[in-house]
């Protein structure tokens, strides 16, 4: 059984439970987490505290019902892919969005080395305007 795959599978299960601590379990102080350019939280965050503050806390404050629906989890050994959709309602505008997304996880011994998000930023931006 691939330890890297299992760690990310557990991350997504924690996400479904809205358990941020569980989501951060495979993240280390050196994990580089990159949100795509054009996404409201674009940039690279290093370590769990920066990731939570820069991404998850802001999502929770600005969106209602923000959800990632996992459709496929791809086991590439040291690289794991998560494919699915985001959906939510932006609190300020009341507009909803659904956006296709791919997460790429570079792993080492069950720990996240790098994460990179690829999503349809136009769909997200339309909800902000």
Image: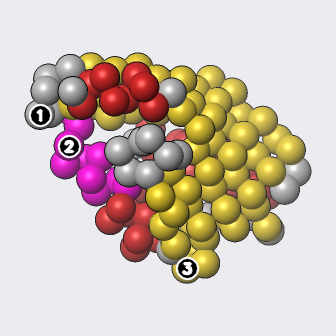
The residue carrying pointer 1 sits among few (fewer than 14), some (14 to 19) or many (20 or more) residues within 10 Å by Cα, namely: few
The residue carrying pointer 3 sits among few (fewer than 14), some (14 to 19) or many (20 or more) residues within 10 Å by Cα, namely: few
Residue 20 in the figure: left or right of residue 14: left
10 versus 87 height, above or below: below
Residue at which label 3 appears: 29
Among the two numbered marks 1 and 2 on one chain, the one whose residue lies closer to the N terminus: 2
Q: Secondary structure at mark 2?
A: helix
Among the two numbered marks 1 and 3 on one chain, the one whose residue lies closer to the N terminus: 3
What is the quadrant of residue 75 in the picture?
A: top right
Can residue 21 be seen at all in this image of the molecule? no
Residue at which label 2 appears: 62
* Magenta stretch secondary structure, dominant: helix
Q: Is 8 contained in the magenta span?
A: no
The residue carrying pointer 2 sits among few (fewer than 14), some (14 to 19) or many (20 or more) residues within 10 Å by Cα, namely: some
Residue at which label 1 appears: 92
45 versus 88 height, above or below: below
What is the quadrant of residue 72 in the picture?
A: top right
Task: Please report the bounds of the magenta region as a residue range.
Answer: 55-64
Q: Nearer the viewer, residue 52 or 4?
A: 52
Residue 126 in the figure: left or right of residue 43: left
Q: Secondary structure at mark 1?
A: loop
- Which mark is in front, 1 or 3? 1
């Amino acid at each position: 059984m691939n330890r890297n795959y299992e760690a990310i599978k557990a991350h997504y299960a924690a996400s479904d439970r809205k358990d941020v601590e569980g989501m951060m379990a495979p993240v280390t102080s050196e994990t580089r987490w990159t949100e795509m350019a054009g996404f409201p939280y674009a940039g690279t965050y290093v370590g769990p505290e920066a990731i939570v503050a820069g991404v998850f806390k802001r999502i929770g404050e600005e969106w209602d019902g923000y959800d990632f629906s996992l459709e496929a989890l791809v086991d590439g050994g040291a690289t794991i892919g998560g494919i699915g959709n985001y959906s939510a309602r932006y609190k300020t505008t009341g507009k909803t969005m659904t956006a296709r997304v791919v997460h790429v996880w570079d792993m080492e011994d069950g720990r996240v080395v790098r994460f990179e998000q690829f999503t349809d930023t136009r769909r997200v931006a339309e909800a902000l305007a």
